[in-house]
Image (cartoon, coloured by chain):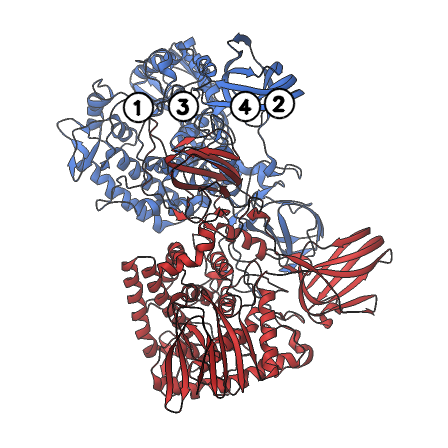
Chain colours: A blue, B red
Amino acid sequence: MILLSTLTFSTTIFAQTWIWYPGDYEIWLGNKMNNRRTERGAFFPPFWKTDSHFVVVEFSKQLNLPQPEEIEIAVEGTFNIKLDGKLQFGMPTRFKLPAGIHSLNIKVWNQATPPTIFVNGKTVKSDRTWRVTYEDKEWIDESGKASDTSATVYLDADCWNFNTKDQRPSLYQLPRKPMEAVTSERKRDGILYDFGRETFGYLVLKQLKGNGTVNVYYGESSEEALDTEHCETLDRVLLSTADSYTFSNSKAFRYIYVVTDKGISVDHVEMDYEYAPVDYRGSFRCNDKEMNRIWEVGAYTMHLTTREFFIDGIKRDRWVWSGDAIQSYLMNYYLFFDSPTVRRTIYLLRGKDPVTSHTNTIMDYTFFWFLSVYDYYLYTGDRHFVSQLYPRMQTMMDYVLGRTNKNGMVEGMTGDWVFVDWADGYLDKRGELSFEQVLLCKSLETMSLCADLAGCAQDAEKYNNLATDLREKLLPAFWNEKKQALVHNRRNGQQSESITRYSNMFSVFFGYLDQSKQQAIKHSVLLNDSILKITTPYMRFYELEALCSMGMQTEVLKEIKAYWGGMLREGATSFWEKYNPEESGTQHLAMYGRPYGKSLCHAWGASPIYLLGKYYLGVKPTKPGYAEYAISPCLGGLEWMEGTVPTPQGDIYVYMDQKKIRVKSPGGKGYLSIPSSKGIKVVEIPAGKEVEFKY
Amino acid sequence: MILLSTLTFSTTIFAQTWIWYPGDYEIWLGNKMNNRRTERGAFFPPFWKTDSHFVVVEFSKQLNLPQPEEIEIAVEGTFNIKLDGKLQFGMPTRFKLPAGIHSLNIKVWNQATPPTIFVNGKTVKSDRTWRVTYEDKEWIDESGKASDTSATVYLDADCWNFNTKDQRPSLYQLPRKPMEAVTSERKRDGILYDFGRETFGYLVLKQLKGNGTVNVYYGESSEEALDTEHCETLDRVLLSTADSYTFSNSKAFRYIYVVTDKGISVDHVEMDYEYAPVDYRGSFRCNDKEMNRIWEVGAYTMHLTTREFFIDGIKRDRWVWSGDAIQSYLMNYYLFFDSPTVRRTIYLLRGKDPVTSHTNTIMDYTFFWFLSVYDYYLYTGDRHFVSQLYPRMQTMMDYVLGRTNKNGMVEGMTGDWVFVDWADGYLDKRGELSFEQVLLCKSLETMSLCADLAGCAQDAEKYNNLATDLREKLLPAFWNEKKQALVHNRRNGQQSESITRYSNMFSVFFGYLDQSKQQAIKHSVLLNDSILKITTPYMRFYELEALCSMGMQTEVLKEIKAYWGGMLREGATSFWEKYNPEESGTQHLAMYGRPYGKSLCHAWGASPIYLLGKYYLGVKPTKPGYAEYAISPCLGGLEWMEGTVPTPQGDIYVYMDQKKIRVKSPGGKGYLSIPSSKGIKVVEIPAGKEVEFKY
């Protein structure tokens, strides 16, 4: 494990790179992300606490130099340098280190952007091996001697990929490239431009002549762009003759409706497309063209919503939401395997102490945050990240445990948003929801695992005991023998009559139920049309995962084609926040009581990416970082399929048709499950060469 | 009480003024203050956690307008405006409010400086009646309805005196005025300038000719300025021909030694004196010229160290230290009565949650912070401030109580600085120090009083119980019957043999001892020369206060003349950080193992200001905000004295000679103690006119 994690970071550990206090750059950059939301021209920041970076940070490194060495120093902030505790004059950009054993400290103050440093010498380079603290407690006594710093908490510095002096982290921007509209058409007083599909970036007006106001109405649909009174985003700006004007705030759109004052004309409209520079490492192809299109549109949806962080959707919030993010992470493991963006998003969602509310104010989103940390470890093997994060996991769990009732269960208290899902029917949010208890239980198990990874055996036992206690209460509290299902909630100790899918499906793939109860739930809930249907791709993700985990890939494939294929048939070029096949026309655009409130490019819309990689190509880690993994391919009714799944060691290739399976694996211990008339046969597969198995 | 507190704020409550989240502007400005420290040209920030402002803050106000009204809006930060929950377009500088009942919200994001707003309309004005939060929890449900904000914590907005649109809080600077050196003299390679007395500001070089480096060595003494290798502060800058160059960083000095390269000449040197624009409301004069000079130099010392905050000293740290600050506050109540600077300093010292160390890392300084809050209330009557601060007092006390041992006592743990005093002898810092327990006990009493003020009766009882428990343990734990004194400490349940002055003198004026023990301590400790002497004005403050509280003004006056008079005879133009009469010559300049480490202008040096006002003029509040107060003048060997003491109602004037007392009081219920042959006679004095009493 340790070897793997070293491998994962080898590109950054020994190269000079800009470094900072873990989580601080991430939180600061996240504030820029979350505060880019606008609603009809008004700034719209989040409603939860916005944290910020530590404004004074000390970076330190113990040196042992065979030769004297000059280092180059770049810093974002006001700083000092101490060598062996002695302050050096000024803020030097070069500094000569003597040979021998020395301690080097750089202390930085920066209110506006995170304190960051870049050090480059022959052997002394800023990297993850530097230690950082926000509180060095280096007081001096009357004799001038430095005092007790034994309680000072140090972490390892964090970094990304800013590896040259000029790549100042605070200046980071995603790359852009110009793109043109596909068609334009005069409509009423203005011109409607169509960029051909959902996109994201900065509108550029060219060859402006005259003076006057330019109004721009953005639409994910043409209806939205043309509905100047109700479209969700717009710009209005007073301009005069110029070659070009680029709007400073990015927007999501497929359509643009430009209406100008009489005094001004705009000859040409284009855009700067802004995108995350990710690689499409995961892939999927099969004989079914609709499925291929679903995968492609899912991947594009993921690409648009993968930005500095994994955001919910590109038009409206552009916020980082925990329940949305955990699905992005999981899809990401089957598409980009972009681990830095996962880590950044996890840091941002956690924020800083003190914890004053649930993650994004939502109880269930707190639990998804815990779960996402262990998922990350399982896919990447990055134990170091978990160790550094662990203290923040503890204080987050302290907050949760401080809000449990006498049964050790959570109930919505004032200020808690009990979300569950956007449902087309009544969901009772009062009392003890079985869904929330199941997630809390899994969160406690996660805490126990992570405590262990952080080397805190006592904590691991404590959380394990709490998880076990709660797990043992779940069935007595919520199982209804008559209904053969977990009921939705319990109020004042009384089970409700209501059955919903949520806790039932999670219990299935969390393995909280024995085989007989799983089978019971399959019929009493999952395949029971009288139970309130799920109409968000968000919860369909888990619903279909539950069915896949019970081996129902054939049924799920049909469902994917019906549901995601349904969106495609409605003209989707990216997948939506919500889709109810029973609605029609512009009903599909409305949400939150607003005619265009719905996001038509929402990360959680892309879940086939995950399902196809994990349950059809059938690849998943069984030990952290794919040290060991399973390949259990399943056609689920397809004639053939092939694809790749990214891992820390490289990409795993899988091909399957009705007669044979071919795999190629880059490393780790892989176990292939081959169907046969006698059941499943498991074979270990060699690394580095393609092998074929007939069945 | 409520009436008084309204009176205190009447000037700001109903006028438009820039407002912010309480404590946030103070903490941000404090970071600028604390980070101005340099040591020989190196930036030197504090070693405790530097907190920062909430970067997103929502300001709200419920309106009931008889007429529509247009407001002018200025904001530091990116902002939005919501009227009745509806977002408005853009970031308007003027906005029309309709008549009727409405809710107005302004939400601001600012990473670099605190979110602040200024609103000015005919009746709608930003002031302390606005509510603020960093977390409004205004989520919407699927229907677009705003959800449960019932757990959102609001505070009242805070402000200072930025009452016009252009006075942006983030641009605040203390005023400056040019001042000239008194003498200049060529010394070795440069010129030594003498500004005549200790001063503070920005050096200005005039009529520069040529090119080259200018080296400036600052000294509180001529020895320091001339000792270019060891002076504490210096500047080195490459300059060329110019009319004038002003250094950007302020310095403290009396002497400047300027040494230039051959290539450059500086024709003239002056300075921009920087100062707090305070009124000298307190005053003291008597027949003894030395005492008058002591008061004047004390007042000047206080003026130099009263800046944006009450700092320790002007040369070296310029940091805000809690133990230093509480004395500044007390002196301030007898000199400037500058309450905003007290509040700012209290906010800055507290910082933000989570609490990760003692105040300034020092255990005793945490306790002085608690004590200072109630002092502030007693002198000002500002209950509102205590209520707003109370949650931060609670979390600070939670930190303390989380670090008590099985006896409910505090012992230094790793990372705790147990300071007590800079002593010229060994002070054991291990185990349970009686000094720390006495301060903890008083802190718990303070918490109980403040909980009551904040309307938290249950808390008040809890803290009172804790205080009572601890107080009952003090004598059994520390009283040594043989030595007739509290011992210094106890280790593993064993009293040490050591007696120091600290806990004994605090127990006296905290009233923790009965009369017989007080008298015993007077002889066994306070007047006992074999007990380790105090050589800082810091602890002499309390030592002399203890003696004064026992009626020993005559002895204390002699002591003041000896000690503070001693500094004057050594040439002091401001009072020092430490003074040991047994030292001589340049020994007086050294500290912390550095030849000029000692600060020669240290706030805690000015304590006669407090002693003369409280125990000679004899004025002190007996009910909060001087609603009731005592005047108990005491000549202490003087022939006559007169002076003024500021109060929220105005200044109290007191004159006393050996035959009569004259007082004039502006309001409140004043009780004058008049000495007579039959003992003390107390009379209530009328407000608004001078009255004379013969005795």
Residues at marks 4 and 3, CA–CA distance in whole angstroms: 40 Å
Other residues around mark 2 within 10 Å, as few (<14) / some (14–19) / many (≥20): some
Q: Secondary structure at mark 2?
A: strand
Give the chain letter at badge 2.
Answer: A
Q: Residue at x 37, y 73 (%)?
A: B492
Residue B408 percent across, percent down from the top left: 33, 67
The quarter holding residue A473 reads: top left
Q: Nearer the N terminus, badge 4 or badge 3?
A: 4
| Amino acid type, callout 2 | Leu
Name the mark nearer the viewer: 4 or 3.
4
Q: Judge whether A652 appears above or below B270 on screen.
A: above
Q: Are marks 1 and 4 on the same chain?
A: yes
Q: Which residue is mark 4?
A: A236
Q: Nearer the N terminus, badge 1 or badge 4?
A: 4
Q: Are marks 4 and 2 on the same chain?
A: yes
Q: Which residue is mark 2?
A: A239
Q: Nearer the N terminus, badge 1 or badge 3?
A: 1
Q: Residue at x 40, y 59 (%)?
A: B5
Given residues A235 and A437, the one toward you in this image is A235
